[in-house]
Amino acid sequence: MSSVMIAFTFPGQGSQAPGMGQSWVDHPSWELVAEASEAAGRDVEHLLLRADADELKETRNSQLATYVSSMIVLDAVERIGVEAAFHAGHSLGEYSALTAAGVISLAAGLQLVTERGDAMQAAADETVGTMAAVLGLDDDKVDMACRRTDGDVWVANYNAPGQVVIAGDPESISAAGAAAKEMGAKRVMPIKVGGAFHTPFMSPARDRLRKALSETEFRSPNRPVYANIDAEQHSDPANWPQLLGAQLTSPVLWRHTLHALSEAGTTVFLELGPGTILTGMAKRTIKGSTTIGINSPADLESLVAQLAVGPDNEATSDGESLYAVERLIVSPSTGPFEPLAALAAGHQIERGELVGTVGDTEVRSAFAGSLQGLLAMAGERVTTSQPLAWLRTDKLGLV
């Protein structure tokens, strides 16, 4: 019987859809939206609930909306005790992965994503560009089709076997697509985006983003994060400003990242955020893996059930996987944490039971279970959604 090792993967621009936040409005994790709006200086709730497809297509809107959506899902998944062994994100999703791994704070992530979206929007307005997916052709041949084209077109994403995205000016995209078809490509599909991302067309955005990156605090990750630019883990926080800057004008090595995650032991690929694009890529790239997309509260129960049986459809033994039967009690606000004096390991907690306070705010458990331990010390200053204690439930599912 094999153990469960989970990778959290986060989608990028293009996964957004009108009304993508609607199913989360009544979930506790929706509270992040108000915090995001304040930090970004934007009406994020409008983007998640009321913006139409044209408004969401704008780079500055799609990136912020997708990032916040992923953070809502991440918070919800962490509330039921699911943890990752690894993190990775596709393009914009790399910022979500870094936030999930504790490399940057949520506030810093919001500021960087806002600046990145604005900078890329400006670069796209300056130089007209677009993207297209080439299907059914080897990576090298797609690259060759671009090189044979006398124009500005480059490979932008190596997504999955037989799925490569090219980007550049529309005329060159058309010419490279025709060359790819001559080489055997099955289809060339235009992608509805507002620019030629991950190409030299984004150089002005990279130069602008560098300043924001230089002013951001990067910390060591609590779990490994894989970078788009080289599909490798980076534990030194000093590397990330350069990696994120270079990412804007370099191709995303997503297929390579999926293989690296698999080689590191990943058996379950969880996509946290809108859409299921990455789920499809993982399924196509890593045969035999478990791929799960989480983009609504309804997906959480099925997630627990799937993790309970593991990738081989066998029930996981006690101790082999913590993910299916653990729950986290998280902070409802920012302030000093004061647990109840009576709390001790083994204490049976009922749903809604008071376990302490954060400042003047009561902390009540959303779950029932046996207290395994505290994750924050008495008097420690904690932030919203920070784990405070963990429980082990008596049964699978959402208690």
Image (spheres, rainbow, N blue to C red):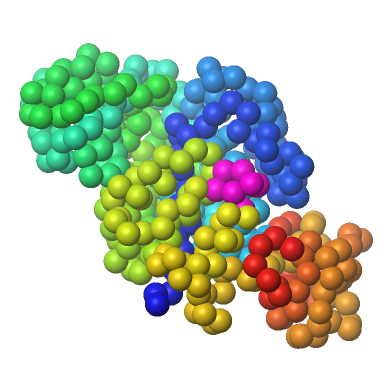
- Which residue, as the protein is rendered here, is positioned at the far right? 360
Mark yes or no: residue 289 visible: yes
Residue at left offset 14%, top offset 40%: 138
Is residue 304 magenta-colored?
A: no
Question: In the rendered structure, which segment of residues is drawn in magenta?
Answer: 294-300
Q: Is residue 221 above or below residue 111?
A: below
Residue at left offset 41%, top offset 32%: 205
Quadrant (top left, top right, bottom left, bottom right) of the C terminus: bottom right
Mark yes or no: residue 240 visible: no
Residue at left offset 61%, top offset 43%: 296
Q: Is residue 254 above or below residue 378?
A: above
Quadrant (top left, top right, bottom left, bottom right) of the N terminus: bottom left
Residue at left offset 31%, top offset 21%: 190
Please tell me in which quadrant of the rendered image residue 380 appears.
bottom right
Please tell me in which quadrant of the rendered image residue 183 appears.
top left
Q: Is residue 360 left or right of residue 153?
A: right
Q: Is residue 315 left or right of residue 111?
A: left
Q: Is residue 43 above or below residue 216?
A: above
Q: Is residue 120 left or right of residue 259?
A: right
**Where in the figure is residue 31, as x and y percent of width and height?**
75, 46
Q: Is residue 370 left or right of residue 8?
A: right
**Where in the figure is residue 92, as x and y percent of width and height?**
45, 41
Q: Is residue 116 above or below residue 336?
A: above
**Where in the figure is residue 388, as x and y percent of width and height?**
73, 70
Q: Nearer the viewer, residue 9 or 117?
A: 9
**Where in the figure is residue 194, as x and y percent of width and height?**
42, 22
